[in-house]
Every structure is written in structure tokens, then in C-alpha cells.
Image (cartoon, rainbow, N blue to C red):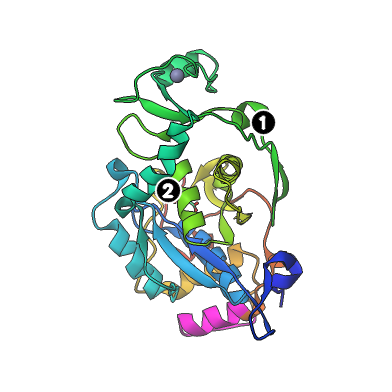
């Protein structure tokens, strides 16, 4: 089995008695905008297996910061599904909606040091100027009240090493954009809270879908800005209905079935490169145990997306676009 030491020698520590142990803290961070579907199961399973195969902890964080997109009941439904699929998390679930004070505490000194400014540009205006934000309002001294707040990009990240995708290059325009840390509606932006949370929860390894490759560059720049140690990143391929369209409510990817976890779990393992042709399981715990002991990073496909049909998702009924 692939061990954490092979991959990340710097995460090997020694305790006071001199025996060595490893620290691994991974997490699954769903947005409760709907129930889990096959695509989110793949992300959950990949982060779970990577954590457990490395004797790590696996945390769950509810990314319910974007309250207008939160669907009532979805957070509980997600947790119920994870339980039904045998994906049991360590510790208490963290809810971003209960952490506004923490986010404000991190933002306050950035404002104090004038790293943050208010921006009045509409999406339409930014589009008309070419689509990428051109740091237009940097020196305009707009009032903070009622406006979006942007962080000056002092640490542009143009490339980074992904544990699966290898060297990732980020277009200069994206890397150097001043990005929003607090929205016009007063909500903290995803980019800010994800970095604050990953740091505060001591996350050492982020394993998630490749739709988040570009945001990773911003998150890495924020880790630098805040003087935090960044975790390792590994982005697994995204399950798409058709090229460029991830499975989502928009293309009718259904919720995975809590009463029949085995077919979807097996399908997700196949998606992640496991060969299940000579094994048979009658419950999720033995299946997951087998998967943990057979997990190896070299199994994982390293493309950015993989097209799946209904058949590939465990015969669940979804309609591609
Ligand atoms: N909440 C994000 C999503 O569901 C994932 C964020 C992350 O894994 O960092 O797309
Ligand atoms: Zn602006």
C-alpha cells in the first residue's frame, strides 16, 4: 500500500517517546444546495479513501456560507447519505454558517492594512472590459458599506503541484485578479472561508474534484497572504454528463439512493480506477475496508473529467443534457 511517507515525507513526525507517527487530516466539504449525487459521491469517496489509507482523519464541513443557495434539509440529507454509504466522519461536523465571527476576525486585519478595497463594478461592466477583473477600483476609495470587498492580489500563484494532476499552470489574468473576499450582499466569499477553515481545522490534504483546480491557485495565494502553511492538493477527475458539464441538478443527476448504497459505491470505485471484476461484497463496510486496503494513488485516473452514462453511475437514472 502506498503510504503517506512516500508521498509527503514532511508530514512524518516523531512523538515524545520517539516512535514515529503520521498526521493526516482530510475533509469532505459539500455545499448543501441539494442531495449528494454520483459526482459528489466520487469526491467524498476519494477524500475518504486517501485519508483512511494513510491512517488519517476524515472530517466533514458543511459549506453553507452561501445562504441563498442553501436548500433547507440538504445538510441533514447529505449526512444521512454519508452514513448510509459507510463514510463515517471523525469529530463534529463544522458549519460555515456558524463561523462568521471567525471569518470577520481574519478579514479585519487585512482591511486594517489596506489590503482590501471596495468594488462597485457589476458583472456586466467587468464582462464589457474583457471578462477578467482588471483591478479597476483599487484606488477609487469606494465606501465598504453595500459594496463587494476585494483583496489585492499580492501573491499571484501561476503554477502549483497537484498530487495527481502534476504541475498545474494558471493563466496570468486569473492569477493576478483581485478577488472578492466579501460579497456585496455581506456574505463571506468561498475563497476566503475555505482557506480559513482548512487552516483552522488543521487540514493537511485536500482531495476534491478537478472543477476546483483554478480556485486552488487563489487559495494558495491566500494561504501565503495569511502566512498559513498550505495543505497538499489532489484533484480527482470530475464526473460529467457531457464534456464540460459536471453532474448536477441542472442536468438532472439524481440523488444517490440511501437504501441501495452498494451499486453506486461500486460504480464510484470503478470511476476511481479500482478493478472490481473478481470481488463481491454484500455490505458497505466490507467493500470500504477492501477499498482502503487496495487504494493506491497510481490507480486514480489523472484526467480532469470523465464522461459517465447512467450505467456507469450504478444504474441510477440521470438524463445527460
Ligand atoms: N463546497 C465546495 C463544493 O461543493 C467544495 C469546496 C472544497 O472542497 O474545497 O463544490
Ligand atoms: Zn471594481
- Describe the element under mark 2 as helix, strand or loop: loop
- The answer to which of marks 2 and 1 sits earlier in the sequence is 1
Q: At 60% across and 43% down in the image, what residue appears?
A: 224
**Left or right, residue 177 beside residue 121:** right
Q: Percent from the top left, x then y, of residue 19? A: 68, 85
The count of marks equals 2
Provide the residue designation for mark 1.
Answer: 171
Q: Which quadrant of the picture is home to ligand 2?
A: top left
- Describe the element under mark 1 as helix, strand or loop: loop
Q: At 55% across and 46% down in the image, what residue appears?
A: 212
Q: Which-is-in-front pick, marks 2 and 1?
A: 1
Report whether residue 33 is seen: no
Disc 2 to disc 1, C-alpha distance: 26 Å
Provide the residue designation for mark 2.
Answer: 248
Q: Quadrant of the N terminus?
A: bottom right
Quadrant of residue 258 within the rendered picture: bottom left
Q: Crowdedness of circle 1 by 10 Å Cα count: few (<14), some, many (20+)?
A: few
Q: Is residue 276 above or below residue 255?
A: below
Q: Percent from the top left, x then y, of residue 219? A: 56, 44
User: Does the residue at mark 2 contact the one at mark 1 (Cβ under 8 Å)?
Assistant: no
Q: Percent from the top left, x then y, of residue 167? A: 74, 46
Q: Is residue 192 above or below residue 282?
A: above
**Front-lying residue, 160 or 296:** 160
**Left or right, residue 191 beside residue 94:** right
Residue range (magenta):
278-292
Q: Residue furthest left?
A: 72
Q: Is residue 214 above or below residue 295?
A: above
Q: Crowdedness of circle 2 by 10 Å Cα count: few (<14), some, many (20+)?
A: many
Amino acid at each position: 500500500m502506498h503510504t503517506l511517507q512516500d508521498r509527503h515525507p514532511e508530514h512524518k513526525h516523531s512523538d515524545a517517546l520517539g516512535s514515529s507517527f503520521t498526521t493526516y487530516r482530510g475533509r469532505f466539504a459539500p455545499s448543501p444546495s441539494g442531495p449528494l449525487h454520483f459526482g459528489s459521491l466520487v469526491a467524498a469517496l476519494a477524500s475518504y479513501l486517501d485519508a483512511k489509507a494513510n491512517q488519517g482523519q476524515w472530517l466533514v464541513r458543511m459549506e453553507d456560507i452561501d445562504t441563498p443557495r442553501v436548500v433547507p434539509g440538504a445538510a441533514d440529507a447529505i449526512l444521512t447519505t454519508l452514513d448510509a454509504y459507510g463514510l463515517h466522519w471523525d469529530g463534529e461536523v463544522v458549519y460555515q454558517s456558524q463561523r462568521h465571527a471567525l471569518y470577520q476576525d481574519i478579514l479585519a486585519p487585512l482591511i486594517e492594512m489596506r489590503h482590501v478595497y471596495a468594488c462597485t463594478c457589476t458583472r456586466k461592466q467587468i464582462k464589457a472590459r474583457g471578462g477578467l477583473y482588471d483591478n479597476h477600483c483599487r484606488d477609487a476609495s469606494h465606501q465598504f458599506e453595500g459594496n463587494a470587498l476585494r483583496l489585492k492580489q499580492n501573491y499571484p500563484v501561476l503554477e502549483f503541484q497537484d498530487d495527481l494532476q502534476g504541475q498545474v499552470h494558471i493563466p496570468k489574468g486569473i492569477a493576478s485578479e483581485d478577488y472578492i473576499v466579501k460579497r456585496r450582499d455581506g456574505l463571506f466569499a468561498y475563497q476566503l472561508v475555505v482557506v480559513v477553515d482548512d487552516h483552522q481545522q488543521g487540514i493537511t490534504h485536500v482531495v476534491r474534484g478537478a472543477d476546483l483546480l483554478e480556485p486552488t491557485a487563489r487559495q494558495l495565494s491566500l494561504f501565503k497572504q495569511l502566512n498559513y502553511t498550505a495543505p497538499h492538493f489532489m484533484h480527482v477527475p470530475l464526473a460529467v454528463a457531457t464534456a464540460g458539464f459536471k453532474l448536477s441538478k441542472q442536468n438532472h443527476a439524481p440523488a444517490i439512493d440511501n437504501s441501495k448504497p452498494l451499486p453506486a459505491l461500486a460504480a464510484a470505485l470503478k470511476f476511481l480506477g479500482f478493478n472490481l471484476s473478481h470481488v463481491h461484497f454484500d455490505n458497505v463496510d466490507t467493500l470500504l475496508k477492501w477499498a482502503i486496503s487496495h487504494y493506491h494513488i497510481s490507480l486514480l485516473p489523472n484526467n480532469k473529467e470523465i464522461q459517465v452514462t447512467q450505467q456507469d453511475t450504478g444504474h441510477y437514472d440521470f438524463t445527460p443534457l
